[in-house]
Image: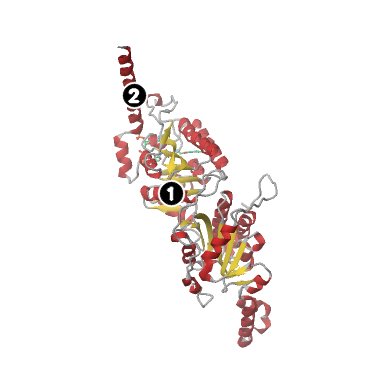
Amino acid sequence: MVAENRGARQMNVVHELEKRREAARAGGGARRVEAQHAKGKLTARERVELLLDEGSFEEFDMFVAHRSHDFGMEADRPSGDGVVTGWGTVNGRLIYVYSQDFTVFGGSLSETHAKKICKIMDMAIQNGAPVIGMNDSGGARIQEGVASLAGYAEVFQRNIMASGVVPQISLIMGPCAGGAVYSPAMTDFIFMVKESSYMFVTGPDVVKTVTNEVVTAEELGGALTHTKRSSVADGAYENDVEMLSEARRLIDFLPLNNRQKAPVRPFFDDPARLEPSLDTLIPDNPNQPYDMKELVTKLADEGDFFEIQRDFAANIVTGFIRIEGQTVGVVANQPMVLAGCLDIDASRKAARFVRFCDAFEIPILTLVDVPGFLPGVSQELGGVIKHGAKLLFAYGEATVPKVTLITRKAYGGAYDVMASKHLRGDFNYAWPTAEIAVMGAKGAVEILYRSELGDRDKIAARVKDYETRFANPFVAAEMGFIDEVIHPQSTRKRVARAFASLRGKKLVNPWKKHDNIPL
Ligand code: HXC
């Protein structure tokens, strides 16, 4: 009889648990879920399910409710408080996640909502695993006032502490406005969904009131604005599903934390594969562009390239590939855009990427075809000196394995900047087509032989002479600044062997509290 009673009580308790779980999983209810779907957006839980390996999600704090007593809030205390948090795996590797639930108080951030996010961030830092945040929120919980602002600041502080310790990725899948934008802004990568997400510090209405500018939310802070113009975001995707599957792809390239190496993936591509087509990649005419991405994909295992900031400063290409199954960060000048010149935007973009790679022990491959820094009044007034210095600084401080290949031009200061020997490049290769000089032959002759400019034949002969002497890699190779001039077709093999030889590299910078990179 006693045992029967106990059994019945347990059944009741289990039933109660299931009931509570069901209520928590229902979020803001069927009507609001329907409205979410009608906007083409998935719910917070659907997103978590798609991001993580099937059945791997373990939830924390499902029953946490807010503690607010203002504005009648005590009568409405939904379980979970507008954010789903926990951990799971992506291709078997530990990941912490939070996913804001727009169907509960518009995903707005309360004191307790923030506490839930902070809890998983603290665990991620302690246990050494990435944090992926799915943002879909009306911002600070209006009913809570300063408690909500405090909650944001607690999250910010953890973003800062986690920076360089565990990878942090922000997936913007709905509104993200006001001070709320500063949490994603401090993470490593931001992805946005086209047309259903936006980020701005002040929205179109405030902008209209203050500056009288009329602008839509999409123009002010949509995915295209932030991937093409402001460079706040690193990738724009068509919908939630595409973004989540691309986020999984990115996670696969990254280490779990700054003390581990990136995972080594099985590969089915011979590291010694010859690529004869590379022998003719460089056009005969030195002013004719070619697509540097062709080289990147031909060097990569199975041609797999995950590009970062594809739509911004396309004169430099950044992203991840694998060579012999190991992650490599690629930085490459792109002759197809602005002739591959370095400018303010390209320098900032590449500097941040190089620093990410160095923070997380990802070796860097630099492919160089750069005619110099972009001249112009707007560049100078925009501070190209400081911004260009960011890339120089980032390369110079990086202690990860650095392999550099000059395919064609490496002129002036840009030669120095692009992971040259002098900035502790480990392997500095050049193709026979490389031209390493202070500037192009024509420009050089116009300065050196100004008095002969009227005589076209003489000038042509001078240009030819300068080209013969400097438009090749051998002067630099004689000085040991280039370690080896290699056949283009054997580049993958040479680069793979170089990185393999550097796996034990140990290089430590002098002790300092932190550096003072030109910001
Ligand atoms: C409480 C909120 C809320 C908020 C939305 N809701 N934002 N509840 N606090 N911040 C609720 C709504 O009342 C509504 O509840 C539900 O969420 C959905 O909102 P809708 O307005 O119906 O949705 P939609 O039309 O899609 O508009 C979304 C929105 C709008 C553009 C985000 O809700 C909005 O403007 N919200 C206020 C944004 C804001 O000003 N936040 C404070 C920013 S300042 P029901 O019950 O009807 O479903 C800030 C500072 C952060 O964030 C500082 C950090 C340092």
Name the one closer to the observer, 139 or 283. 283
State the quadrant of the N terminus: top left
| Residue shown at the point (56%, 43%) measured from the top left | 165
| Residue shown at the point (51%, 38%) measured from the top left | 124
- Mark 2 or 1 closer to N-term? 2
Residue highlighted by disc 2: 14
Q: Pointer 1: residues within 10 angstroms few (<14), some, or many (20+)?
A: many
Question: SS class of the residue under badge 1?
Answer: helix
- Give how far across and how far down residue 404 sits, in percent: 58, 63
Q: Which circle, 2 or 1, is nearer the viewer?
A: 2
- Give how far across and how far down residue 89 sits, in percent: 43, 42
In the picture, measured across the screen, residue 76 lies left or right of residue 368, that is left
Name the one closer to the observer, 137 or 370. 370
Is residue 382 something that shows in the picture? no
Which label number is shown at residue 247? 1
Name the one closer to the observer, 148 or 43. 43
**Is 9 located above or below residue 114 in the figure?**
above
Q: Quadrant of ligand 1?
A: top left
Question: SS class of the residue under badge 2?
Answer: helix
Identify residue type, mark 2: Val
Identify residue type, mark 1: Ala
Is residue 210 something that shows in the picture? yes
In the picture, measured across the screen, residue 377 lies left or right of residue 35, that is right
